[in-house]
Amino acid sequence: MTRSLALFVLASCLPLFTTEAARPNILILYGDDLGFGDLGCYNKESKIPTPNLDQLAQEGLRFTDGHSSSGICTPSRYALLTGRHHWRRFHGIVGPMGGSVFAPDDLTLPEMLRGKGYTTAAIGKWHLGWDWNAIKKATAQPQGTGRRKILGPEAYDWSQTIPDGPLAHGFESYFGDTVINFPPYAWIENDRLPRAPDVMMDTSKWKKIKEGNWECRPGPMISDWDPYQNIPTTTKRATEFIKLQGIKKRGPESKPWFLYFAFPSPHAPIIPNDQFDGTSKAGPYGDFVHETDHACGRILEELKASGQAENTLVIFTADNGPEKYAYARDQRYDHWSAKPLRGLKRDIYEGGHHVPFIIRWPGKTRPGQVSKALMSQIDLFATIAEIVGSELPADAAEDSHNQLPVLMGEVPESPIRNTHIHNTKVGHYAIRNHDWLLIEAKTGYVSGRNAQWESKHGYQPDKETAQLFNLKDDLGQRHNLIAKHPEKATKLRTLLKMIRARGHSAPRLLE
């Protein structure tokens, strides 16, 4: 079938997706600092049991070339929810008690879906900022000295609503703790705290950490806060939300729904609950991944029990690759979380942003399908817009590609997406075009080089000032070809400069 015929057939089917009865519910399950090689469906040698996500892959479509926008948390989440490369606006994360990264006129995925009649909810990690200054008292005085100055719980009026959070950007409801290792250490319900923090963070009150460090920033906390309750509590909220929507489906309040469920795991602090201790062969991190998989299973089980699984588009992916503890894990347990990739969280090598990416849409995605298509989380916006029949304005989702033909099992004559730009910090870019990837820097490491790991996995020192790889032949990025193919590097530099200057890359805006 030619591409033009395939698209014609696809177009003729679209009204089936956009009718009131057939519009799918949408569930995004978003991991945090999860490696491409942690799941069994991506790595047969993984030492971590992930039966629920492996089953999801068997029932749906598994991308082998799926990517987040960044190698760190906030930018990837922003890109997913806006369909825009984060580096067009910013590069870093929102710090403790930091402001929102959204502009007031940004069209977000939940806003678009609300416009099509969807109920929208966010549960779990937010890490996209709030206007905490709005509830800060005029008399607030920081504790400590120098760089350690921090505002205590008495500096805020916790009875007020907190502006510019999830409810200001398209979500009708929110429940979570915004960021597991940032203050305030308390639950947030919609746009307020049900209980006010009354002490400063004190990790000595918590059960002993199981791997690495707490990595928790100081700030206000409720005195009986227990970070180990994050996954159990948010998972329970997710199942309650799905069950309620199932009940509503049987009555006059029936509406399609969108749930964005963002895990705190396996991001540090690595704190699997006791029932998961020793259930993997990759240490506490592996146990934490197993607990994350178990939580996915509970949510998907409720989806089925409530009778909504057949009309729900489920997406599982992660914000970036695993944290630097992965080096010690590889040495101790012989489990490389990013296998077969080079690089970790923050890095612009593949391991920093090449992530698990699974989509199940019963009756639409073919069970057990594996796609080699280049897929970005940025593309979810335009793809979902096509599914629900939303025409996107020119100033929204500027980098999002409609990948619906790929979901439907079509194989276009030319790739829907052939270029992707990766970035974690200012002036540090990698550009992918078809099989070629240029790292426009002396190294793709941002977290730091681990010589012991490189030696174990056969990497050699490189003296070049930039790196060029052919990922088709060298997915592990061992062989720098820039000296052999300088013309390829020049072409990619020109393309990078053009896309950055142009302000958009979505096909609909290039026509």
Image: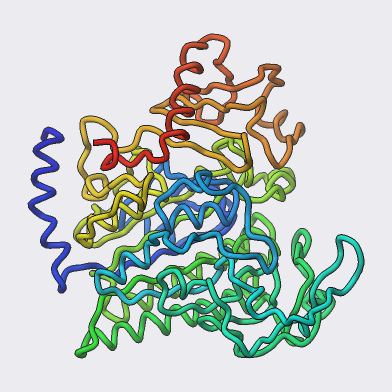
Which of the 4 image quarters holds residue 170?
bottom left
What residue appears at the point 29 percent right and 53 percent down from the top-left corner?
A: 393
Which of the 4 image quarters holds residue 279?
bottom right
What residue appears at the point 63 percent right and 77 percent down from the top-left corner?
A: 134
Instruction: Please state if 132 lies on the left or on the right of 503 as rendered.
Output: right
Residue 31 lies, in percent from the top left, at 52, 60
Q: Looking at the rendering, in which quadrant would you find the C terminus? A: top left
Instruction: Please state if 5 lies on the left or on the right of 284 as rendered.
Output: left
Residue 214 lies, in percent from the top left, at 76, 65
Pick out the residue farthest to the right: 145
**Between 243 and 215, which is closer to the camera in this rendering?**
215
Q: Looking at the rendering, in which quadrant would you find the N terminus? A: top left
What residue appears at the point 47 percent right and 35 percent down from the top-left corner?
A: 500
Residue 104 lies, in percent from the top left, at 46, 64
Pick out the residue farthest to the top: 484
Residue 223 lies, in percent from the top left, at 76, 86
**Between 372 and 393, which is closer to the camera in this rendering?**
393
Q: Colour scheme in the image?
A: rainbow
What residue appears at the point 56 percent right and 15 percent down from the top-left corner?
A: 482
Total labels drawn = 0
Rendered view: 7 above or below 189? above
Rendered view: 188 above or below 419? below
**Between 53 and 312, which is closer to the camera in this rendering?**
312
